[in-house]
Image (tube, rainbow, N blue to C red):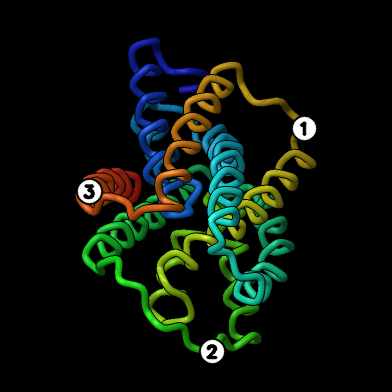
């Protein structure tokens, strides 16, 4: 379906995105995977999903970047090795238009992974862990791969970077959130710029209301998350939604 969903569905979409922005911003993410899932459920066309998800991602990730930086959790030496090659890679991915079926399958797989990542993060606990030394060359290679995937799908890459940082022991929980947020921000901006160069159009009218919703949710979530930990139960609930939606996109 092209254009905005019907009014009742649109209100549910905006409310869901506000809630998703709160949850994702609380862990330093932009929320694109949840936005894409919500748009898929309400029938928004795949051609509109990627640019809208990136626009919403930029807004929420910017808020999360500011809040986590102000709280003193950001670490430049942990950020730049991942970002230096991810930015041009995200631009490259954003310039590529996948066929509708291929896009749905790829995004469906990303949503399945995002659901697993959220479920895992809820089970993993919130205890800080000692940081190990970051191999710069490996971080650059990882960033390049995540940048391409970010541009292709419309997600910022934080759902992939966060578990890598935590599982490898390169960062604690708060440092991971503080690095994921600007990583998502720069990748989303690069992919969005590439899409605009290819097709210079303004967002559809209904997208501005969605932007207002995620700004409200993202501000509150980033404020909460930069000072406290997010609720694991809510993460599990969202994980199930993402997994179901991702499975539907892959199989249908």
- Residue 95 seen in this snapshot: no
- Location of residue 202 by image quarter: top right
Query: How many numbered circles are shown?
Result: 3
- Position of 139 compared to 238: left or right? right
Say the numbered circle drawn on residue 200: 1
Tag 3–tag 2 contact (CB < 8 Å): no
Residue at numbered disc 3: 240
Residue at point 53% right, 20% down?
209
Secondary structure of the residue carrying numbered label 1 = loop
Disc 1: CA contacts within 10 A as few (<14), some (14-19) or many (>=20):
few
- Mark sitting earlier along the chain (2/1): 2
Nearer to us in this view, 228 or 23: 228
Q: How far apart are the two marked residues, 2 and 1, measured between alpha carbons?
A: 42 Å
Q: How far apart are the two marked residues, 3 and 1, measured between alpha carbons?
A: 36 Å
Residue at numbered disc 2: 133
Report x, y in % for residue 226: 46, 53
Q: Which quadrant: the N terminus? A: top left
The relative height of residue 152 versus residue 248 in the rendered view (above or below) is below
Secondary structure of the residue carrying numbered label 3 = helix
- Position of 159 compared to 193: left or right? left
- Location of residue 79 by image quarter: bottom right
């Amino acid at each position: 379906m092209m254009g905005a969903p019907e009014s009742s569905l649109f209100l549910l979409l905006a409310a869901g995105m506000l809630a998703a922005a709160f949850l994702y911003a609380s862990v330093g993410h932009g929320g694109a995977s949840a936005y894409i899932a919500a748009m898929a459920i309400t029938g928004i066309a795949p051609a509109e999903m990627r640019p809208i998800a990136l626009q919403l991602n930029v807004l929420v990730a910017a808020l999360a970047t500011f809040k986590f930086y102000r709280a003193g959790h950001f670490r430049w030496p942990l950020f730049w090795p991942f970002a230096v090659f991810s930015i041009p890679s995200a631009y490259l991915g954003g310039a590529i238009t996948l066929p509708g079926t291929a896009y749905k399958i790829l995004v469906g797989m990303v949503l399945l992974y995002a659901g697993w990542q959220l479920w895992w993060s809820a089970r993993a606990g919130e205890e800080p862990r000692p940081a190990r030394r970051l191999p710069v060359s490996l971080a650059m290679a990882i960033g390049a791969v995540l940048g391409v995937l970010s541009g292709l799908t419309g997600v910022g890459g934080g759902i992939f970077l966060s578990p890598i940082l935590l599982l490898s022991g390169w960062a604690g929980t708060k440092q991971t959130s503080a690095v994921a947020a600007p990583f998502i921000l720069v990748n989303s901006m690069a992919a969005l710029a590439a899409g605009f160069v290819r097709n210079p159009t303004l967002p559809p009218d209904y997208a501005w209301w969605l932007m207002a919703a995620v700004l409200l949710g993202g501000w509150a979530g980033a404020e909460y998350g930069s000072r406290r930990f997010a609720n694991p139960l809510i993460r599990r609930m969202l994980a199930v939604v993402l997994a179901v939606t991702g499975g539907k996109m892959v199989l249908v």
